[in-house]
């Protein structure tokens, strides 16, 4: 839907730390008993988007580390 695309676009602009902070805030809101069911569902979907963004950023960082030459700490394109 349009809303999910907007959330995905917004999440893609965040750093890993910002995404984790957003996830933490959503988790706090999900634990609130006074939040209506429709809003819980919205928070859950947003959380999934932030989580996927964090995973993507971690995988990219991992690939960079894998490509580092252990002696020079320069990126080795052949790795």
Image (cartoon, helix red, strand yellow):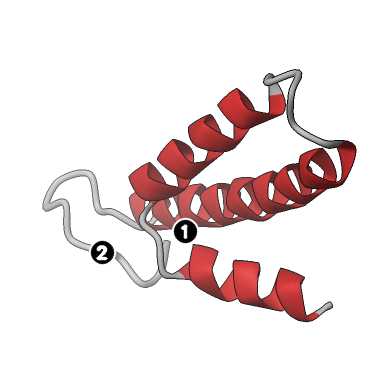
State whether residue 33 is above or below residue 4. above
**Residue displayed at 69% across by 19% down:** 31
Using residue 36 as the reference point, say whether residue 16 is left or right of it. left
Residue 67 position within the rendered picture, expressed as x and y whole percent measured from the top left: 37, 57
Q: Residue furthest right?
A: 37
Residue 38 position within the rendered picture, expressed as x and y whole percent measured from the top left: 86, 46
Q: Residue furthest left?
A: 72
**Residue displayed at 46% across by 48% down:** 19
Crowd rating for badge 2 (residues with CA inside 10 Å; few <14, some 14–19, many 20+): some
Q: Nearer the viewer, mark 1 or mark 2?
A: 1
Residue 14 position within the rendered picture, expressed as x and y whole percent measured from the top left: 40, 61
Q: Nearer the viewer, residue 48 or 32?
A: 32
Return the disc, 1 or 2, that comes first in the chain's sequence: 1
**Residue displayed at 58% across by 24% down:** 28
Q: Nearer the viewer, residue 63 or 35?
A: 35
Crowd rating for badge 1 (residues with CA inside 10 Å; few <14, some 14–19, many 20+): few
Quadrant for the C terminus in the image: bottom left
Residue 45 position within the rendered picture, expressed as x and y whole percent measured from the top left: 77, 51
Q: In terms of secondary structure, where does tag 1 sit?
A: helix
Q: Nearer the viewer, residue 53 or 36?
A: 36
**Residue displayed at 30% across by 65% down:** 76
**Residue highlighted by disc 2:** 75
Confirm or deny contact between disc 1 and disc 2 (CB under 8 A).
no
Separation of residues labelled 1 and 2 (CA atoms): 13 Å
**Quarter of the figure with residue 77:** bottom left
**Residue highlighted by disc 1:** 60
Q: In terms of secondary structure, where does tag 2 sit?
A: loop
**Quarter of the figure with residue 75:** bottom left
Q: Nearer the viewer, residue 63 or 3?
A: 3
Using residue 26 as the reference point, say whether residue 36 is left or right of it. right
Q: Which mark is residue 77?
A: none
State whether residue 28 is above or below residue 56. above
């Amino acid at each position: 839907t349009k809303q999910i695309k907007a959330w995905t676009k917004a999440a893609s602009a965040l750093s890993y730390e910002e995404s984790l902070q957003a996830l933490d805030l959503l988790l706090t809101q999900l634990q609130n008993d006074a939040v209506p069911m429709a809003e819980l569902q919205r928070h859950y979907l947003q959380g999934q988007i932030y989580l996927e963004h964090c995973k993507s950023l971690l995988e990219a960082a991992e690939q960079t580390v894998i490509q580092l030459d252990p002696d020079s700490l320069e990126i080795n394109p052949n790795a």
